[in-house]
Structures are given as C-alpha cells and as structure tokens.
Amino acid sequence: MKNLLSVVLCTTVLSACSGGTSDSAPEPVAVAPLPAPEPTALEVSIGELKEIMGTTSPTGSYEGYLLPESDDFLNIPQDPSNPITAEKVELGKFIYHETGITSTETNKTDLENTWSCASCHNGQNGFKSGIRQGIGEGGIGFNHRMLAEGINPEDADVQPVTSPTVLNTAYQEVMLWNGQFGNEVGGIVNIGIDPDRHFTEGTPKEANLRGLSGLETQAVAGLGVHRMNVEEGSILTTNEKYQMMFEAAYGTSQPHDMLEAAALAIAAYERTILANRAPFQEFLRGNEDALTIEEVEGAKVFFGKGNCAGCHNGPALSSPVGSMATEVFMTLGFHDLDMWDDIIGEVPDGVREGRSGFTGDDMEKYAFKVPPLYNLIDTTVFGHGASFTSVEEVVRYKVAATPQNPDVEVSDLDYRFTPLDLTEEEISNLVTFLETSLYDPELMRYVPTELPSGLCVTNNDDDSRSELGCD
C-alpha cells in the first residue's frame, strides 16, 4: 500500500512538472520583430557619397578611386617598355636618394656629392621640395634649403617653377608642369606635337627620342640636367652593392646604357610611391569608420556640388589614365614665381606660358598640368608659382574663379573654372577632406635609412647632415 501511494505521488509530480497533456499546452505567443535601427547621419552621408562618386568615377564605381598596394605591380600604371620589378624598385630607391653620384665634369661648384633627386622631391615634404624653388647643386640645408654663401646663382641648379610632387605620378603620362617629357608607345597626350619642339636637339627634350613615358623620360633627362654621374667610373659602376643590385635588376652589373638603366630603375621606384594609407583609401577599402562626418560631407562637395572631380579625377585625383591633353592641362590664372621678391634667377617666357611654351599652340597658353591632391599639407607651397600658402587659399581662389595673374584674361580661363556657390560650412568641410582624408602619414616608408655610399640620405652638405641627423 505504501509503495502504491509513492507511485501515485510521483506520477502526480511528474505530470505537474511537464505541464500536463499535450492537449493543454499553451499556444506559442507571436513576438513582433524589432524595428530596424534608424541609420545614423554618418551612414546616410556615406551612402550619398558613394552614389555621387559612382557618377563621377571613370569606372562607374566609387571603388574606381582606389590606389593599389605599392607591391601590386600588375595594377600600377607603367610604361610597357619598363615593366616594374621588385629589383628595379629597390635599385631605383637607392639611386633616387643617393648623394654620391653627382658629376665632377658638369658640376659648377665645389659642393659635389651633396644633393640627390630627393633634394627637390623628398618624402618629408610629400615628395615635393618643401620650398618655393627646388635647389640641387649650390644649395645647403634641408628644411629651409638656400644658396650656399658665395655661390653665383647662375652656377646653381635652381628651378623656375615649384617642384611638382612625385607622389601618385604613376597615373600621369607626361611630366613637368608643361608636360614636355613623355613619348611612350601608345601615348596620347603628346601626339602631333611639332618634332622640333618635342625632340629639340641640344636640350633635355632629346630624351623623348627614347620613346618612353613621362616618368622614365624625366629620369633620363633629369640625371643630366641635375648634374649627376651614372656612367663609367661613377659610384654606380664601382660600388659593390650597386653592382649587385644592377645585376639583380638587369642581369648584368653594368648595362650597356647605364643612363637609361638607372633612369628606368628610378621611374619604377617612383611608380610605387602611392598614398595608399590615407584615410580616404582606408574608406575605399571598406573601413567606413576611417572618415568623420565632416570629411564625408567634404568629399560630397568635392565629388558633387564643388565639381572638383571634373578636373581632379582617377585614383590620384589628378587626371585619369588615358586622358587627352585637354583633360591634363588647364588655365586657372595662377601667378608665376616672380610674384615673390626673393626669387633666384628669372622665369623664362616659355615657362611662363605653360603648355604653350612647349607646344607653341596659343590655345594652350598659360595652361599647366593638373596636379595630384594627396599629402598637400606636407608643405605650404601650392601652384606652379607658389602663389598660395594654404589649401584653404587655393579652395577660396577656385570658389571665386578670378585670375590672379594680370597676363591672364577671364576669357583665357578654362571653361570648367567658374565661380562656385559654396557655403562657409561646405568650404570648411571641403578643406578638411583635402587636408585630412587625403593625407598618408607614412610616406617615409619609401625612403631608405642608409645608402650604399655611406653618405647622408637626400642631402649631404654640412647643414643638411646636422638637420637630418646624419652626424
């Protein structure tokens, strides 16, 4: 009897715990899904930006503004006659910064082995010179490079225009403000130019006869113009490390044409100097937290209402690959260098006339090449004549669209250069985008810490050695 009672009690308990029979199970309660969270102001702005960029991008997608990684050689624009290799890039990086290759035959001062290509295009200054006039031979100092005491300005290597940046120039077919260097196979920008002007005998433009792109041609011409020795007996042919690097790059420690071999290596290196770690590039790779709301709004002005992308387009925000000359050179009425009282030397008329000074075409008078826009704030020098000292000054000039050069009439200005109806907030956001979003803070990754010669990197005069910490 006791056992029977236990069984009844246990059964009752189990039945209560299980909720009884299936017939008495409660109906499931339907739970309404939670409403999707409202997008934030930043998310809405990003969506609008991507849509705008898709309409301006040469590829039809906002991702068309993405720069490749610096070792992604297949996706970096290059001269078909100079395929990029890691060995050429490594060699070019050293030659570009080497202060031990200046030529004793063409030097006009006693300052041999104190400058390099990087003297006027260095990583610390966004691969520009950082000053109004780049100075090669005859200059001393790094941060505020100037003529050495007692140097005749006529003997110094001083530029009559500001030094254009090397950063992102893989996307440009021709070089210099007037585009006079460049004649690659399949090139289009310099097609049809009078041969007497394109290949002028006895001038650096003879380098165009080699049939190379702008960067390669400029490197060939520049080694001579800037009084550097890469021929027999130079450090490139006598230094064991350089001999090993030339052999790795070309299969021989001393190529038949050392000038072209050195130039091709320099150009291959320059093509890999890309601002691909800027916040805007991080954004394009999918990190939507890389930009603030102000930067995104500024980008919307750049690609939208401000129509900046009408001139500054493609991954470098200069001119897209494959552009015609009319998309590469524009007349905006900037002053020349002689607006400054302390200019060294004179501005030749041919330089003053911009593209026309090279081509002879009056329709291109005062037109200069559209520059890339990354790392602008590494210097306070803007325009071919250094006529602006801040990004905001340039932006406000373009908003007003009134020429500052008295030789340039309003009728001479490019048809795309017209006044803009931007609010102060839009101007502020645009400047923030240009200064912050397009700034790669790690450009020194492209600069060697030492050279095969053992000399100071970039500049090797006493003042520079002290400033750069070489001593």
Image (cartoon, rainbow, N blue to C red):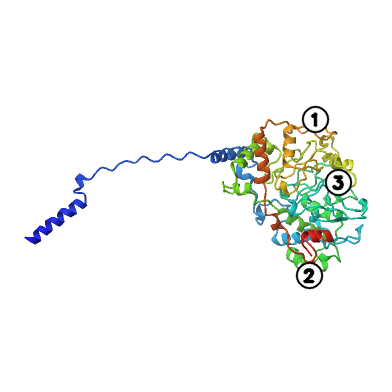
Q: CA distance from mark 1 to mark 3?
A: 25 Å
Residue 70 visible in the picture: yes
Q: Taking 28 as reference, is 105 above or below it?
A: below
Q: Where is mark 1, residue-wise?
A: 410
Picture coordinates of residue 83 (x, y %)?
72, 56
Point out residue 72 in the picture as x, y percentages from the top left corner. Answer: 65, 55
| Of 435 and 86, the residue lying toward us | 435
Q: Secondary structure at mark 1?
A: helix
Image quadrant holding the N terminus, namely bottom left
Amino acid type of the residue that numbered disc 3 sits on in the rendered structure? Pro
Q: Is residue 207 left or right of residue 89?
A: right
How many residues crowd mark 3 within 10 Å: few (<14), some (14–19), many (20+)? many
Q: Is residue 251 visible?
A: no
The location of residue 189, given as percent across then percent down, is 77, 43
Question: Residue type at mark 1?
Answer: Val
Disc 2 crowd rating (10 Å Cα; few below 14, some 14-19, many 20+) is some
Q: Secondary structure at mark 2?
A: helix
N-terminal label among 1 and 2 = 2
Mark 1 / mark 3, whichever is N-terminal: 3
**For mark 2, what is the residue?**
240
Q: Nearer the viewer, residue 180 or 288?
A: 288
Indicate which label's residue lies in the foreground, 1 or 2.
Answer: 1
Mark 2–mark 3 distance (CA, rounded to whole Å): 37 Å
Check disc 3 and report the residue beneath it: 160
Identify the residue shown where x is 81% and y is 37%. Answer: 364
